[in-house]
Image: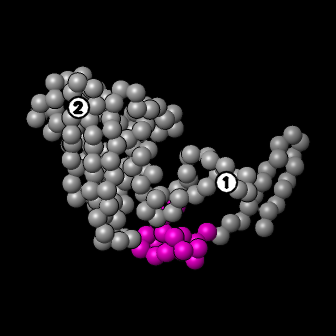
Amino acid sequence: MIFINIIKTKVIIMASINITLDTVNETNRRGYTYRDVDYKFVLDARGYDFHNLDDINAIRNGLVNIFSWRRGERIILPEFGNTLYRFLYEPMTAEVLSDIQRECVEMITRWEPRISILNVNLEAFPDDHEVLVEVQYTIPTLTDAQLNFSTIINDSKR
């Protein structure tokens, strides 16, 4: 039910909304537990470019976002993202790789709490100033299967 009152130049809209939230462990009536937006914006046969990602794909998209955004780039949430690029021109010693691994675990734990990290493996390519990050994880609320995510961190990664 919506009520609209016009008082001089102001419009006041009051709405009564009933919201029912699903618990994390329950799949809603549409058949998914998690949903995210696919930012590729590719046209489909119907001419739509806006699509949703569900469950495993939604969470994978969350990981892509964590590794794609540099900290400070999101105006509304400036602490989101990573600062891994700062390590790329350092000598790739065991200590630096350990720092990269620790930062990966910290940012995934903070920004993607729906997953349980099993392992984070790194492979450095010092001549190219790149690091391959491979994450093995599970999604306890969806499946016990081990899932894999990998990305390359380099200075051009945006």
Residue 12 to residue 57: above or below: above
Residue 45 to residue 144: above or below: above
Q: Secondary structure at mark 1?
A: loop
Q: In the rendering, at what x and y percent does residue 81 appear?
A: 39, 38
User: Residue 74 in magenta?
Assistant: no
Q: Amino acid at mark 2?
A: Phe
Disc 2 residue crowd, few under 14, some 14–19, many 20+, Cα 10 Å: some
Q: Quadrant of the N terminus?
A: bottom right
76 relative position to 131: left or right: right
Q: In the rendering, at what x and y percent does residue 117 appear?
A: 26, 57
102 relative position to 18: left or right: left
Q: Quadrant of residue 16?
A: bottom right
Q: Is residue 22 visible?
A: no
Q: Which residue is mark 2?
A: 125
In front of the other: 33 or 129 = 129
Q: Which residue is mark 1?
A: 44
Q: In the rendering, at what x and y percent does residue 70 appear?
A: 40, 33
Q: Amino acid at mark 1?
A: Asp
Q: Which color scheme did the rendering employ for the protein? A: one colour
- Quick one: label 2 or label 1, which is nearer the N terminus? 1
Query: What segment carries the magenta color?
Result: 19-35
In front of the other: 111 or 149 = 149
Q: Main secondary structure of the magenta part?
A: loop
In front of the other: 38 or 127 = 127
User: Residue 32 in magenta?
Assistant: yes
Q: Secondary structure at mark 2?
A: strand
Q: Is residue 5 visible?
A: yes
In front of the other: 36 or 135 = 135
Disc 1 residue crowd, few under 14, some 14–19, many 20+, Cα 10 Å: few
* Residue pictured at 46% horizontal, 72% vertical: 23
Alpha carbon of mark 2 to alpha carbon of mark 1: how far?
38 Å
Q: Quadrant of residue 142?
A: bottom left
